[in-house]
Amino acid sequence: MPSKDVKAASIETAVLSAVALGDENKFDPAMEKLCGIPLISLQIRDLQELGIKQFLIEAEQLTGGILSLVDELKAQGIDVAMVRAPKDLTASSAMSGKCLVLAPGINVGKTILGGFIDQNESVVATVDGRDENSAFERIDLNTRWAGMAIVDQNLLKGLADLPEGWSLTSAILRSALQSEVKQQLISQQQIDSGALQVIDSNDDAERLKREKLQDAASNQSGLVEMEAYAPLARWLTLRFAIDPKILDVTGTIFALATLLFGFFGVFAAAVFTAILAIFFLTVSDIIFRVTQDRNSRILSVVSWILLVIALLCFGIWTGDARIIFAAPIAGGLLLYSSRLRLKTNMRRYLPSPALLSLSLIAGVVTSQYSVVFQMFVLLQVATLLYVQFTTQKNATELNRP
């Protein structure tokens, strides 16, 4: 279903490539994994949000990994098919109108893709022929292919007689150029920003993974989450290739343990497991921003509910009216602040579940839990007032004539 923030495209078919590149064709950028998901799957999810409904994946060899990928995509209800020869492009009766083509090893940001698809006309995206763009396929002395094209189905039908072994995307490019399809230059600024990249080596793939995780982590709220948990989460995810499902289950287990310890009044253990639960939930949230995995979100919501119930049990067990009063207020302010849309530099000042769990260590040491809760609620209110005041002040200054 297209994103509400993006205009739906009338182009509904995309041709992508899972062809291996590099020395002796041993590197397949499409099958490189981030958070356990192939990069080509992440690209497909971006395209789905832009209105693309049908996906044709070029592959020279039907390896176990590619077959597994196709099966997983079909299990998610995605219309996907393999293409091994040019004639396979026209085999699908559902394919009609124009088609988006992405070259192997090309990773395109959603913003560029959205603007490109919205044109709904035949066009070949190009980049300047300067040396720093040497990774892009050359068209002529001054121009290189940006790895994107929109072509008519009739052009694809004309490729049906090409023999197997030809580079499908290159053949589409040459045919489009011979048909004098118009060219559109992608600015060097967009390339330098990383919005359009060629991934043809392991180093390129690792850099792309770091960038995607960095973008996801930058959307975190709370000082502890942004400055401590997010960098550690990026390091763990890249270094150990952790399966996101394991993180989800681990966070839920620690949240459940927090509830049980809180229910039986084992406060020190409850604080310890709450710290671990929130850390794993933060990592899970970063992965969700990358993968948009709905199952991950469901487990995360369940875990947060368990932690809120544990907080209430904690207050009831102590019998301290101040904790019973402060605990739901603290939880409510955390929920409210999580829904605010603010710039990155302002989100760091929002109330932080991680800060609350860490501050409870002081409560364990001093047994002054009510004081910790009250101080945290005051801190939440103060930071929310500061954020709201600063945001309104900036908006007022921008609106001045």
Image: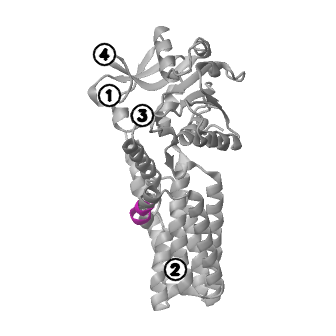
Mark 3 and mark 1 lie on one chain; the one further toward the N terminus is 3
Q: Mark 2 or mark 1, which is nearer the start of the sequence?
A: 1
Q: Which mark is residue 134?
A: 1
Q: Amino acid at mark 1?
A: Ser
Q: How many neighbours does mark 4 have within 10 angstroms: few (below 14), some (14-19), or many (20 or more)?
A: few
Q: Quadrant of residue 136?
A: top left
Between 70 and 283, which is closer to the camera in this rendering? 70
Disc 3 versus disc 4: nearer the observer: 3
Estimate the spatial distance between the alpha carbons at disc 3 and disc 1, rounded to whole Å: 20 Å
Outermost residue, front side: 24
Residue 24 numbered mark, or none: 3
Label 4 sits on residue: 141
Disc 2 residue crowd, few under 14, some 14–19, many 20+, Cα 10 Å: some
Classify residue 189 as left or right of residue 74.
Answer: left
User: What residue sits right under mark 2 in the picture?
Assistant: 272
Q: Amino acid at mark 4?
A: Leu
Residues at marks 1 and 2 touching, judged by CB atoms closer than 8 Å = no
Foreground mark, 4 or 2, reads: 4
Q: Is residue 283 magenta?
A: no
- In three-dimensional space, the C-alpha distance between marks 4 and 2, rounded to whole angstroms, equals 63 Å
Q: Kindly identify the amino acid type of the residue bearing the numbered disc 3.
A: Glu
**Distance between the Cα atoms at labels 3 and 4?**
27 Å
Q: Nearer the viewer, residue 98 or 367?
A: 98
Q: Secondary structure at mark 3?
A: helix
Say which of marks 3 and 2 sits in front: 3
What amino acid is at disc 2? Phe
